[in-house]
Structures are given as structure tokens and as C-alpha cells.
Image (cartoon, coloured by chain):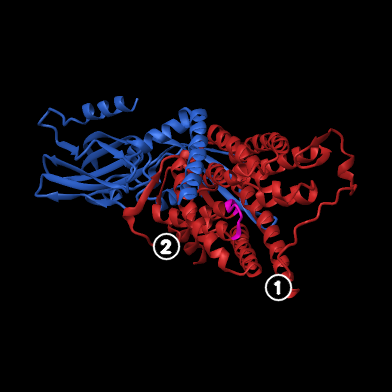
Amino acid sequence: MMRLLVLLALFLGAPPAAAQSPLVADLSKHLVAITTGFTGTDVLLFGAVDGPGDVVVVVRGPPRAEKVRRKERVAGIWMNRTSVIFTDAPSFYRLAATKPPEAVLPPALLDRHQIGFEHLDLAVEADPGENPAAFRDALLRLKQRRNLYGDKVAPVSFLGNRLFRTEMYFPANVPVGAYSVEVYLVRDGEVVSAQITPLVISKIGVGAEVYDFAHQRAPLYGIIAVVLAMSAGWLAATAFKKG
Amino acid sequence: MRGASRSLRGRCGGVTLPRKMQIYLPVAELSVNALLILGLGGLVGFVSGLFGVGGGFLMAPLLMFIGVPAVIAVGTEASQIVAASVLGVIAHWRRGNIDYKMGLILVAGGIAGSTLGVLAFRALRGMGQIDVVISLSYVVFLGGIGALTLIESVQLLRGTSQAPAAAPPRRKLHRHLWIHGLPLKMRFRRSKLYISAMLPAGLGFFVGIMMAIMGVGGGFLLVPALIYLLGMPSALVVGTALFQIILVAANTTLLQAMANQTVDVVLALMLLFGSIIGAQFGARAGAQLHGERLRGLLALMVLAVCGKLVWDLVAPPADPFTLVAGGLLE
């Protein structure tokens, strides 16, 4: 499955052949591997445009259900009481642009392309009587606190009139999956050209295998955990017996 | 203000350690500082070596304090207790200080209790209440132990300081209580007891639940209960308790791994390594220090951890909203 995604990423990520396209962009890498020592990484987005204009970049992680719980005081103790599920919120969301997107695009287009937090379409499953707006704010805030939603628009810088670049940071706790990097070229309040480049973030190495093993072969993982613990205890006992 | 600093401390454990030492816990899906984890293992190991206690009751709360999710702390502790108890039981096994018949009845109860406990754990987790249940259980448990130990050591310090600490309990052969009227009587030759099997089974059951919900071996409860409640000879008690704890912790580890995926072997091995080293120093230090004062120190430590848990439960949270961690939402 993961290999397929990687191949797909490499295939789709190839720069378009049409040289006349008003916008061409690519990433310095199409695969971010989370290994045991992963502490976050930068991916460079670079590209060229055929004339003046503004560039807006949206990095979107795979959508997934996010559950937000609210604590309330019950008999003096703060405990979770109510919860709301956002059925497919982007797991990761960041913006980069030459100018603030609200300054270059009308609200209707921001809505259509879901650029900016106010324009994110977050489907919600809440109990009647709940106020989803408070939970929506909480989701955005908590995601920002975890560095999974960008709290400000990162800069996109131009080199000359045609070439642009921006660094996209992915923190240590970045969710895995198929990401999309959307690049919009904006002129006079219109999207002139757009390109979507996939980016795959996946766990690689021993850590990933341990995780997959723990989830897919849970009984065997459990047995191994027990055997490992017993042998470690026995080993320690013999080591200190001799020592 | 206070809230902000609280959440910050939760993140980095209040200590700034070199970033290079970060290690990724594959099952917890969490990057932690290896030195911090080894140090924590060492600290708890030191305490357990110093006082001759298991230390599981300190490990899980301390892991929670540095930001490890409570469910991972509790699940992983079960596997660490397996290792620590195997290490501890070997000496008793060599000396033959285990009553296997009694042990197996305790285990039977323990398996039932821990299985039920893991199922409850799973259900509570789905409801979003597991963290508060874990914390409350710890508050009751640590508060009780801390208070009792403190009272005991204060009494010892005030009273005849010459008297040996805690005279070995004399077994009264013919004391009849309601517990001796229970059915299913069984003869335990090794322990020289003729008692109802329901007693050790019930005791094992209770300790098994604690193992699943709190990630503690329960030796703290099991040892006095076997001596005072069942009247077992004290020479056999520790070995038999460890025998029970190994098998019940093994069952708990297996079930937590299957039902909740909360056992992180990398975390467990790091904690174990730290605690084995720490225990050696603890045991050495313990031999040179004063018993009663040491006990008072342990009580204060336990009460401090308990106090911090109470504070976290009653203080208004920095943010009443929480995001269910992606990997933990199933």
C-alpha cells in the first residue's frame, strides 16, 4: 500500500511536460520518511511563473476524523463531558503566500479552494444542544498548538520575476499519509493557474515496522512483549548474580 | 498564566535536554528524550532498591507528568513489571520460597481480574474517561499508602527507637473470623493453611484489576494481605506474590497489547534498563541509611505524587478542550 503511494507520488510529482503552462512547481522531495530519529524536516517548494502575479500555497494533510472533547467540572473534578467529531478535517494544514491570501483573492474563491481557517469546510458531528463553533475554535487552536496547523502564512519569496520558492516545515509529530501541496497563481483576484503536487509522508524503518506489527499482529506483539520482558528480567538476574 | 506554564511543563518535563537524545517511541507515536526516560527509570529503580518496593506505583504517574499518555504509561508498566518481577523472583525460587498451590489460586483470580480490568479500560477509553479513572485510582491508592506509611514511621520515630522495625507477625493458628466460614476450603500444605480458596482468588482478582487499570503489580497490597488476612508464613509471602505478579502482569501485557495497543516495548526496555541500574544503587544506599526515616521519606514522596495528581484533577485546566490524539482514536 505504502509502496504504491510512493510510486504514485513519484509519478504524479513529475513536472508537467507542457512548457507553456503559466505555473510550474515542484518539491525538493516527494517522500518524507519518518525514521526513529525524526525531529521534523523542511521541504523546499520551488517553481516558475510566466509573468507577474501572486503565489498562494496550501499544504493539506490527509483528512481524518478528529475528536475534540471538553472538560467540565463534576464534583470538583475536571473530566471530559462532551465531545464533537469533525468527520474529515485536514490532519495538517499550512499556508504560504507572497501576500496574505485575503488581500489577493475574493472570499468566494477562498471558500472554493478552502484557503484560510475561516474558509475551511469542516463537517461536524455534534450532539444536539452543543455549540460546534466553540469546538471548531478549539480544534484550530489545539492543532496550531501541536504545530499541525500553521498559525501564520509563511512567506513565498520571488527570485527575479519568474522564480519562486518557499520552505515548508513538517514537525516531528506530523501525521503520515498522502499530502497535497496546492500552488495557485493569482492575478487580479482570479486564479490563473493551479497545480497540485502530492507529497507522501510515511514511517520508515524499525519504528514503523514495530507500529504496524503492534496494530496488525497485536496478539503476536503481546506475546513478544511478554517474552522480551521475561528474558530481560532473567538476563538482569544472571548479570547481577555474577557481578 | 498558571495554566500556560502547566501545559509547557507537560511538554518538556520542565527540563531542557539535548535534542539529539530524542528517541521515537513507535507504539506511543511520541518523541521523547532518551536521557529523561532512562533517568526516570533510574530514579524509580533507586527508590525501589532503597525501600524494597516494586516502584510501579511511582512509574506510571511520573510518566504521565512528563507527558506520556496515561494509557501508554499504564499499558507499558505491565510489561515492565513482568521483567522486574522475574528479576526479583529468581532468588526466592532458588531458595524454594514459593507456595505454588497458593500462587496458582492467586493467579486464577488475577487472570480473571486483569482480563475484566483490560476490558473496562477499553470501554472507559472509548468514553473518554480512562484518564480520570486512572488518576482517581492513583489518588486513592497512593493517598492510602502514603498516609499509612507516614503514620507508621512517625509512630516508630516517636516511640522506642531501639525497637526493631516492624516485628515479624506471629501467626495465630486458631483465630476464627468470618473469613474462615467461607466455602471451598482447601489445604495449602506449604503454607500450613486450611482456608477457603475464595480468599486468595478474590485477593488475586482485586490485584488483577489494579494491574490492568493502574499498571501496578500490587505487591504493596498483596504482601500484607497474604500475611495478615490469610496468615501465610512471611518467608513464603514475597516469592509467592512475585510468582502471581509475573503471570498476571504477563496476562495484562498480552491483553493490553491486543485490546488497546498501549504497550510500547521501546519505552518498557528503556525504563527497565534505567531501573535495574538505579535499583543497584538504591539497595546499596538503603543498607547505610536509617530504616524509619527512610520510610517517612518514601511516604512523603508518595504523598507528593498523590498531591500533584489531585492538583491536576481539581485545578481548572489551561484549556478545557482536548484533541483525541490521532493514533489513539480508533
Q: Residue at x 24, y 34 (%)?
A: A197
Q: Dot 2 falls on which chain?
A: B
Residue B153, horizontal then vertical, whole percent = 70, 68
State left or right for residue B98 relative to residue B15.
right
Measure the C-alpha gap from mark 1 to mark 2: 36 Å
Q: Which chain is red?
A: B
Q: Is residue B241 magenta?
A: no
Ranked by sequence position, the earlier of labels 1 and 2 is 2
Residue nearer the viewer, B133 or B94: B94
SS category of the residue bearing label 1: helix
Q: Which residue position is annotated with label 2?
A: B15
Q: Residue at x 26, y 26 (%)?
A: A8
Image height check: is B106 above or below B142?
Answer: above
Which tint was used for chain A? blue
Circle 1 marks a residue in which chain? B
Q: Disc 1 residue type?
A: Leu
Q: Could you classify mark 2 by the number of other residues whose Cα lies within 10 Å: few (under 14), some (14-19), or many (20 or more)?
A: few
Q: Amino acid at mark 2?
A: Val
Q: Is residue A134 left or right of residue A128?
A: left
The percent position of residue A198, horizontal first and vertical second, equals 27, 33
Q: Residue at label 1?
A: B157
Q: Residue at x 78, y 37 (%)?
A: B188
Residue located 86% across and 43% down the image: B179
Viewer-proximal residue, A239 or A44?
A239
